[in-house]
Image (tube, grey):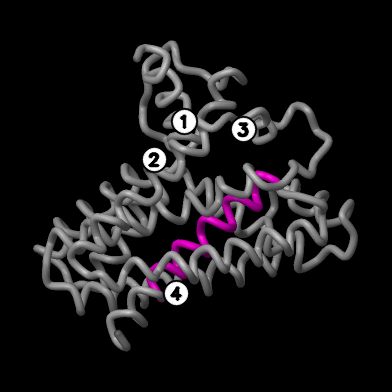
Amino acid sequence: MKKELHIFFTTLLFYTRIPCPKNTNHHPDYLNKASRYFPLIGWIVGGISFVVFYLSSLVFSVEIAVILAIIASILTTGAFHEDGFADVCDGFGGGWTKEKILLIMKDSAIGAFGAIGLVLLFLLKFQALVNLIEDTKSISVGFLLFVSAHAVSRLAAISIVFTHEYSRDDATSKSKSIAQNYTWREALGAFFFGLLPVAVLSVFFWQMAFSLIPVFLFRFFLARYFQKWIGGYTGDCLGATQQVCEVVFYLSAIALWKFI
């Protein structure tokens, strides 16, 4: 139990800005097992985001509350995944070879493709959440929507680690340690924590079970695209997958509630 808590806090330290016990660090042995709790981090981030939204909605309009909720999720993770999304936009938008793509993604400066991509991503996320909130009157369902989106999108991202190879040769990269030698425990834990919120949400709206189809279709095509151009994935690719799949989940929910 103590070891599992250490692994969990390692995951929390790596993926968020939430304070952890002082003995927590990025030790490769624990970081390698952290993937089992990555979707669970989605529960925390999604929960924080929803709490900020709910409290803000008591004072402000839905639109302002949604913006504050998005800001809360970004602050909680330190824009970890948004940064990866921007780097992927820059790398694959400006590079035409594996070496050039990886070089651009490693550059800390944001380029035109990254800036444009982030603007469009946030606009789409904002409008999708506003539409969902307006259609959802139940606090419990709203909470489950936030948590499910963050959990299943992280499952989609980390599942790439289980099926593809890390692309960079840089042994100093912390991302390379993630699930290098994963076991069934990492895969089982990731799928359990990633799918459980969606399963509970489906009790209220059975249609939401079908939201997994478009999410994992996008995951499949993104993974194949990364494989084609750079021969695998990087940490930035995982971050981009999380962001894209989160938005796809919101859009899927809107479509399912409208047509089914």
N-terminal of the pair, mark 4 or mark 1, is 1
| Secondary-structure class at tag 4 | helix
Q: Amino acid at mark 4?
A: Leu
Q: Is residue 240 magenta?
A: yes
Labels 2 and 1 touching (C-beta < 8 A): yes
Residue 66 at what x, y percent from top left?
Answer: 28, 66
Q: Main secondary structure of the magenta part?
A: helix
Question: Alpha-carbon distance for marks 1 and 3?
Answer: 12 Å
Question: Alpha-carbon distance for marks 2 and 4?
Answer: 24 Å
Q: Which residues are magenta?
A: 234-251
| Secondary-structure class at tag 3 | loop
For residue 106, side relative to residue 204 (left or right): right
Question: Alpha-carbon distance for marks 2 and 3?
Answer: 16 Å
N-terminal of the pair, mark 3 or mark 4, is 4
Query: Measured along the vertical axis of the image, is residue 61 above or below residue 219?
Result: below
Q: Amino acid at mark 3?
A: Ala
Q: Which residue is mark 2?
A: 41
Q: Which residue is mark 3?
A: 179
